[in-house]
Image (spheres, coloured by chain):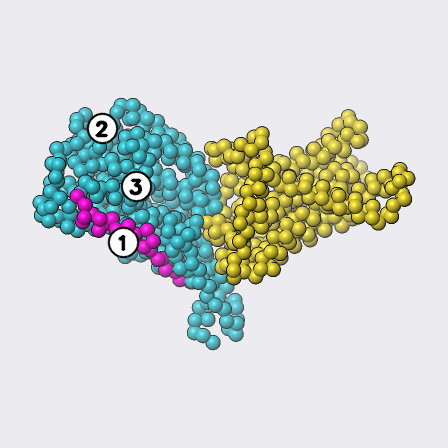
Amino acid sequence: MSPRAESTSTGEVHEGQPLVGRDLRTEELVFNMGPQHPATHGVLRVVIKSDGEVVRSLEPHIGNLHRSSEKIGEELPYYQWLPYVDRWDYLAAMNNEHVACMAIERLGGLEVPERAEYIRIIVAEVQRILSHLMAIGVYGLDLGAFTPFLHQFRERERGLDLLDHIAGARLLYHYVRIGGVKRDVSKEWIDELEVFLDAVEKRLPDYNTLLLHNHIFQERTCGIGVIDREVAVRWGVTGPALRAAGVSWDTRRDAPYSIYDRFEFDVPVGPSPIAGVAGDCFARHWLRVREVTESVKIVRQALGQMPEGPVMARVPKSYKPPVGEVYVRGENPRGELATYMVSEGKDRAYRIRCRGPSFSNIAVITEVSEGLLLGDLVAMIGSLDIVLGEVDR
Amino acid sequence: MHTWLDGLIESSSWLQGLPAGLLYLVAMVAAGAFLLIFSAVLAGETVWLERRGAGRMQARIGPNRVGPQGLLQFLADALKLLAKEDIIPSSADKTMFRLAPIIVFAGAFVGFAVIPFGYGIVVADMNVGLFLVLSLTSIEVVGVIMAGWASNSKWAVLGSMREVAQMVSYEMPLGISALAIVVLGGTLNLTDLVVQQSGGVWNWYVFRGPFAFIAFFTFGTAMLASLKRAPFDLPEAESELVAGYHTEYTGFRFAIFFLGEYAGMILFSLLAAILFLGGWDPGFPLPLTEGLLRWVGFLVLMGKVFILLFVMIWIRWSLPRFRIDKVMYLCYKVLLPWSIVCVVGIALQVLLADALPDGVIADWLMGR
C-alpha cells in the first residue's frame, strides 16, 4: 500500500475521518484549472491535486500574461513608458499612473500643482469605486449569482464615461502625466461626477440585498478561506485582504502620499459585523463594499476643497532626473502598489521594478486552500480579486 | 385519446374496414410526433421567456429581433447549432458519447405522453401515470453519467458525479411529496387527481390542510434540485466546472441536452400544477359549454405552468449557487424528514376524515 493512500482516502470534508477502508486505494485527481477557466479571472493556471471535490494541495502557475513592462521602462523615456503602467492592473489604471508618476516626479524633485493633486485624488478614488464595483459584481458571478454583475455594470458604465470624458479612453487612460494631469476638468464634469456618486450610494444597498445579506451567499463565504493576521503579514498580503484579516493598515492613512492626509475617512477592518470571522471570504467582500462608501466620502471632500489654478507643472521637454533611486508606494484597490526606480541621470530609468499587490495576494492560496471544496476554492480566488495583468506585469 | 379513437372508428365505416392494430399504430405515432413538436416549441419558448425575463431583471433587453418580441429566437438558435461542427473528442468513448444526449432527451420527453393537458386531452391516460412520469425522469441520470464518462474530461466527470449524487438524492423527497398527494387522492391517475380538485380554489390539493401545503414546497424545492436549476445548478456550475457534464459537447448534441433540460422544466411544472394547483381547474365556475371548457382548461393549465416557470426563472437570476455539501444537507436533513412528515400527516388526516361524520369538513379533508 502506498504511503500517500492514507492522506487521500478520506471522504468527510471537515473532520477528515477516513470513510474508505485501508484496503481500497484511491488516487489523487490532478486538475488543471486554467489558464482558460471561467473562474480564474484571466489567465491564471492552478494545478489542483484533489480527492474528488476536496482540494488537497494546489499550485498557482503564473506568467501567461507577462509583457516585460519593467524591462520596457529601461528602453523608453519616462513619458513614453507611462502608458505601459496602465496595463499592470487594468481595472485600476488611474491608480497605477498615480504611483508611477509620483516615483518619476520624486526622482527629479518635481512639484505638482495643487489642483492637479486634487484631480489625481478624485480620479484615483473614482477608479477605486469602479474597481470595487467590478470586484463585488464578479464575486457574485463566481458564486453563481449573475444578476449583481450586470447591475453593477450600469453604475460602472457611468463612471467609465466620466473618465472617458476627461481622458479619451475607457479603460487605459494615460491621463495622469509627469508633473500633473493631461487636462483640466470642467464644471459640468464635476456636476456629472456628483450624479455618479449619488447613483453609487443609492444602488449599493441593492447589491447588498442580492449578495451581502443573502443567506446562501453567507453560507458560501463565512468562515471559508480564512487568511488570519499572521498568515497575511507573513505572505505580504495587502489591501482589502489584509484589512479583512484584522490588520488596520491603509497606505493612504498610515503612510500618506500625495495629499491624502487632508481628508477624513475611515479604514474599515474585518471581521464584518454582519457575519463571519476575520479574514474569511465574507469579510473581504464586505470590506470592499465599505470601502466604496469611504471613497465616495473622499471624492466629495476633494471636490469641496479643490482650488483653481494650473494642472500641469513646467516639465522640461527632455526630462532627466538626477542620479538616484526612489521607492514609492500607494494604495491600489487591490493593495499596496509600489514602484522602485533607479535613475542614472538619463531620460530613461536604469532599472524599474514594480511590486504588484495581486502577486503577493495570489501566492497565499497555496497555504490556505488545503481542505477546501472545489466550489470554495472558486470563492477563495474570487474574494482575493486578483488581476493577472498585475501578477505578471 | 383511446376513447376518442374508438369513437372515431365506430362512427366511420371506412375506418372499420382497416385492421385496428395499424390504425392505433398510426394514431399513436401521429400523436407522439405532435407531442414532440408541441413540447419542443414550448421548450424553445421557455428559453425565450428565460432570456427575456433575465434581461428585465438585469437591466438589459434580451433577444428581441427574431420574430415579434424575439419569440422565434429559438429557431434561429437551433439553426445556428445545426450549422456548427459536430466535434467528438478523439479520446471519447464514441458510442456512449453519441447515445448520452438521446437518453437525456428521451427521458425528459416521454413523460409528456401521460400528462393530461386538459380534461381528456391526453395521449395515454394511465392508471400509473404519476409513477411513470417520476420513473421516466430518473432515466436522465443514466444519460448524464454516460455523457460525463464518455467525454473523458475531468470536469465532465466531476459534473456528472455531482449530478448523479444530486438527482438520486432529491428523487426521494420529490417522490415522497408526490406520494402525500397520492394518499390524499387515492389514485395515481393524473386525470382523476385533477378531477378531484375541481370545484373551487379551496379544493386544490395545496390548500387541503397544512401538510399538503408543506408538501407543495418540499416538492417544489426537490423539483428545482432534480432539474439542476439554480440555486442547485452545481452539475453545470459554469464558474466551477466550466460547463459540467456537457463541457465537450458541441452543435446539435449540445442543443439536445439544452432542449431536454427545458422540456424537463415544463414537465415538472405541469406535474406540480396537476398535483397541487388544480390542473386545468380555473378555481371558480365558468358559464361555458363542456367542449369550450375543455380548451379553456388547457389555457388555464398553461397559465399555471407559466407562473411556475417564471418563479423558477426568477429564483435562478436572484440567488447564488449552493455548495455541494449544503445541497446534500438540505436534501437529507431538511426536505426528506419534512416530506415524510407530510405523508404521515396526510394519512392521519384521511383517517380523521373517515372517523368524522359525513359533512363539508370531512369531504374537504378527504379530498372528495
Three-letter code, disc 3:
Ala
Observer-nearest of B345 and B37? B37
**For the point 52% across and 60% down, which residue is it?**
B90
Q: What stretch is highlighted in magenta?
A: A55-77
Circle 1: element type: loop
Three-letter code, disc 2:
Asp
As drawn, the residue found furthest toward the top would be A187
Pointers 3 and 1 in contact (CB under 8 A)?
no
Observer-nearest of A340 and B344? A340
Residue B367 colored in magenta in the image: no
Q: Quick check: B157 above or below A238?
A: below
Q: Mark 1 lies on which chain?
A: A
Report whether A272 appears left or right of A96: right
Q: Which chain carries label 2?
A: A
Q: In which quarter of the image is the N terminus of chain B?
A: top right
Please give the residue where the numbered disc 3 appears in the rendered image.
A92
Observer-nearest of B243 and B89? B89
Q: Where is residue A293 in the image (x, y as percent from the top left)?
A: 33, 36
As drawn, the residue found furthest toward the bottom would be A1
Q: Where is residue A352 in the image (x, y as percent from the top left)?
A: 19, 50
Please give the residue where the numbered disc 1 appears in the rendered image.
A236
Q: Quick check: A63 above or below A103?
A: below
Q: Position of residue B99 (x, y in %)?
A: 62, 56
Drawn colour of chain A? cyan
Q: Which mark is first along the chain, 3 or 2?
A: 3
